[in-house]
Image (cartoon, rainbow, N blue to C red):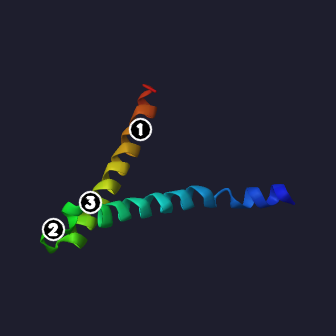
Amino acid sequence: MERELSSSREPLLPRALGFAAGAMIFVVVEEIIPECQRGGNASLATAGAMIGFAVMMVLDVAFGLVDCWVGTR
């Protein structure tokens, strides 16, 4: 019974950790970095930071896949 419970939660863990990381990045950009609040562009600055982070992660994964295909890792 215990083994069944842990295996049913396994696919949830990476998604939950990803959500938590995204929430932390949002909080840091929105609330802690004071430069984002200047000039009335807080929402635009937050959206830009989140989009930039997403692009960075996509490129990281893409280049990681290229390295795996080439065999340099």
| Of the image marks 1 and 2, the number of the one nearer the N terminus | 2
Task: Say which residue label 1 marks.
Answer: 64
Q: Residue at label 3?
A: 33
Q: How far apart are the alpha carbons under marks 3 and 2?
A: 10 Å
Between marks 1 and 2, how big is the CA–CA gap?
37 Å
Q: Secondary structure at mark 2?
A: helix
> Residue drawn at (62%, 61%), measured in percent from left and top?
12
The amino acid type of the residue labelled 2 equals Arg
Residue type at numbered disc 3: Ile
Residue 21 image point, x, y percent: 46, 57
Q: CA distance from mark 3 to mark 1?
A: 30 Å
Q: Which tag is nearer the camera, tag 3 or tag 1?
A: 3
Left/right placement of residue 7 relative to residue 60 reads: right
What type is the residue that disc 1 sits on? Gly
Look at 28% across and 56% down and name the residue there. Answer: 52
Q: Is residue 61 above or below residue 71?
A: below
Q: Which residue is mark 2?
A: 38
- Residue 45 image offset from top left, x and y in percent: 22, 65
Residue farthest toward the left in the current orientation of the protein: 39
Q: Quadrant of residue 3?
A: bottom right
